Image (cartoon, helix red, strand yellow):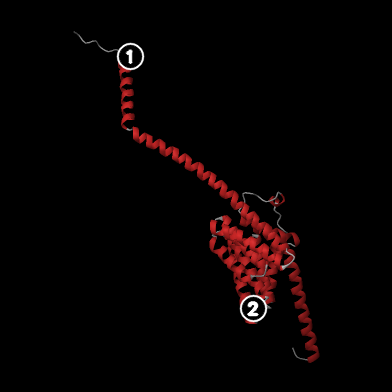
């Protein structure tokens, strides 16, 4: 009996049937593997959902802690007596230490560390303020953040010097402050406002140690190169919720200061005072020479 030749359509149907059969056989052979892969996919989806929920909860809780710390800071600054100050400080440090321990070198952790320094600075506990600022500096690699930390540390050292009776210790603190003002200027060069802020600190150091010519030169630089406050259009719109919290803190402090008096106006007032003092000293010297006949 002669074999019937298969048509093209029949061959195509056979190929499809064979392909389906191979696919079914493959599925049967790899059934356990496929079930395992499906289970892994489901597990990944569950974990992702859990992590997303956890991150949202952590973000909400951390923001709440930082807001509580800022509220306590406002209470600290407006406290009427020592008892209120201690209460506000205790509440603030509790929140900040939790944030620092939990978030470490993250932007939120650094912001908490910087704010902790400001809290201790506000109650004149300069050693603890300096410890916090040094920790902040050790955490950051950003030049502008380093400049802010250096200025804060320098201010703390400078103010601590005013509480010291020993002149040698006082000068040592002032010398340390000068170094950190210089580091701030190097980390954030002109035209940054931090550069000129650091220059004002350096000029104040030279004035305090009676190096008036150096102070005058620095103040003249500020007056010449920063003639007016730099306006920030974003400031009028309120705080940016996506902004680095530590940057927002320092911007707030700088805006408060410049709202009272621009850097250039501050420098100009101090420059006029120094020049007047120099003129008075020269007049006294001239009168003394005329009276005594010797310089």
Q: Position of residue 18 (x, y in %)?
A: 30, 22
**Residue 189 visible in image:** no
- Label 1 Cα neighbours within 10 Å, binned few <14 / some 14-19 / many ≥20: few
Work out which quarter of the rendered image holds the C terminus and state it.
bottom right
**Mark 1 or 2 closer to N-term?**
1
**Residue beneath label 1, please?**
9
Q: Position of residue 270 (x, y in %)?
A: 74, 70
Residue displayed at 59% across by 71% down: 179
Left or right for 293, reference 116: right
Residue displayed at 80% across by 88% down: 290
In the image, residue 28 above or below residue 74 = above
The foreground one among 93 and 189 is 93
The foreground one among 118 and 217 is 118
**Residue 93 visible in image:** yes
Q: Secondary structure at mark 1?
A: helix
In the image, residue 157 above or below residue 226 = below
Residue displayed at 68% across by 57% down: 71
Work out which quarter of the rendered image holds the N terminus and state it.
top left
User: What's the mark number on residue 134?
Assistant: none
Q: Which residue extends farthest left?
A: 1
Residue displayed at 54% across by 44% down: 53
**Residue beneath label 2, please?**
170
**How far is mark 1 from mark 2, CA to CA?**
102 Å
In the image, residue 215 above or below residue 190 = below
């Amino acid at each position: 009996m002669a074999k019937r030749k298969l048509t093209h359509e029949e061959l195509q149907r056979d190929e499809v049937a064979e392909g389906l059969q191979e696919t079914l056989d493959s599925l049967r052979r790899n059934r356990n593997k496929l079930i395992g892969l499906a289970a892994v996919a489901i597990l990944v989806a569950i974990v992702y959902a859990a992590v997303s929920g956890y991150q949202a909860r952590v973000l909400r809780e951390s923001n709440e802690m930082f807001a509580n710390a800022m509220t306590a800071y406002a209470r600290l600054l407006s406290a009427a007596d020592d008892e209120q100050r201690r209460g506000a400080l205790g509440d603030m440090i509790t929140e900040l230490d939790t944030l620092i321990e939990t978030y470490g070198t993250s932007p939120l952790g650094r912001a908490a560390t910087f704010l902790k320094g400001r809290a201790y600075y506000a109650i004149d506990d300069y050693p603890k303020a300096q410890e916090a600022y040094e920790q902040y500096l050790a955490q950051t690699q950003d030049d502008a953040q380093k400049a802010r930390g250096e200025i804060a540390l320098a201010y703390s050292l400078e103010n601590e010097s005013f509480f010291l009776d020993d002149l040698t210790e006082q000068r040592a603190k002032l010398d340390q402050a000068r170094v950190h003002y210089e580091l701030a200027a190097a980390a954030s060069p002109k035209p940054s406002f931090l550069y000129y802020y650091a220059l004002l600190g350096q000029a104040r150091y030279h004035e305090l140690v009676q190096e008036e010519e150096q102070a005058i030169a620095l103040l003249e630089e500020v007056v010449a190169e920063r003639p007016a406050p730099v306006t920030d259009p974003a400031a009028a719109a309120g705080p940016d919720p996506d902004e680095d919290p530590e940057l927002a803190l320092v911007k707030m402090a700088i805006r408060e200061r410049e709202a009272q008096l621009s850097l250039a106006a501050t420098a100009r007032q101090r420059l006029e005072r120094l020049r007047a003092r120099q003129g008075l000293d020269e007049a006294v010297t001239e009168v003394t020479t005329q009276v005594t006949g010797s310089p």
